Amino acid sequence: MKKKLINTIEQGMLGILNNEQLAKLHEVLEASFALLTKDSGDTQQSNDELLKLFLSAKQVEGCSEKTLKYYRTTLSKMITKINKSIRQVETNDIRSYISNYENISNAGKVTLDNIRRIISSFFAWLEDENYIVKSPARRIHKIRTGKTVKDVYSDEELEQMRDSCTNSRDLAIIDILASTGIRVGELVNLNINDVDFEKRECVVLGKGNKQRKVYFDARTKIHLYEYVANRHDKTNALFVSLNNPHNRLSIRGIETILHKIGSNLKSTKVHPHKFRRTLATKAIDKGMPIEQVQVLLGHSQIDTTLRYAMVNQNNVKASHHKYIG
């Protein structure tokens, strides 16, 4: 029956399509009938299975558990709301879903574009793996988010944070965040033996389980060494709780410490990610090539590095006077 139907369609297109186009038509028809055969089972189970396969592929690629959870939640919501077999989802279904999500959740443009990006990645994978003929997300373009100017820590604010620290551990945390620009997740995973005090560098495990070296300044070396030397516990972790049993600090633990330091300063909200943006901005502002900043921060795409860095407006003005005015 399938072959007969395909042959009938192809016979009807003779004289309209050339041989190359007929060959492509045959390929599309074969794939379409294969999908119909696959899709004859239980729809919900099929959707669940495809989502599991996609997440497994992302896990193999090195995505963190946090990223996988975000993918799973985002895609599950989309699948439930559209309420179709994944293979039958159309472009307008996705557009309507994103539009309704914006209206109901009052979500920002950045959130919406993240949702679009994840959905697009999912359907592109389905296409690559031949579960669908063509991704319905292809024609849904990037959502313009607008650029917001995010501030960085000034030298005075960093000094005020250091002065606000009441113990050597917190001082070492401020210093290492400020001088290396590492992610807070990388910070909490550091062990003492990851640090080379002589070379003033340490090895961190970044996104995708990729190792890289980061470097710290002389002040950080002094304060970090003082903190480690005065510890009497047997824990391998670099940063631990002050009280027994001296457990490794969690991301939440670091955020709590920084929030407490920020509350003492009153005028400054202290967050670990802001140290990273500050380092990138200062590095580029002082002439470090963007490619080197990219390596330092552990970014796979240079566009990500550019989003972290802000150009000092005073330097723009000085350059304008120098080269133009």
Image (cartoon, rainbow, N blue to C red):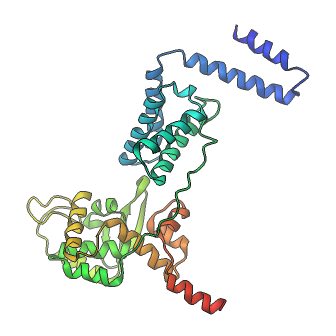
Using the image, determine if residue 274 lies above or below residue 221: above
The location of residue 23, given as percent across then percent down, is 80, 26
Task: Name the one closer to the observer, 52 or 74.
Answer: 74
* Location of residue 156 by image quarter: bottom left
The location of residue 121, given as percent across then percent down, is 54, 42
Using the image, determine if residue 10 lies above or below residue 256: above
Quadrant of the frame with the C terminus: bottom right
In percent of the image, x 49 and y 53: which residue is there? 109
In percent of the image, x 46 and y 45: which residue is there? 102
The location of residue 6, given as percent across then percent down, is 75, 15
Which residue ends up furthest to the front in the rendered image?
103
Using the image, determine if residue 314 lies above or below residue 89: below
Quadrant of the frame with the N terminus: top right
Task: Name the one closer to the observer, 165 or 241.
Answer: 165
The answer to whether residue 4 of the structure is visible from this angle is yes
The location of residue 249, given as percent across then percent down, is 21, 60
Does 137 sit left or right of 205 as displayed? Answer: right
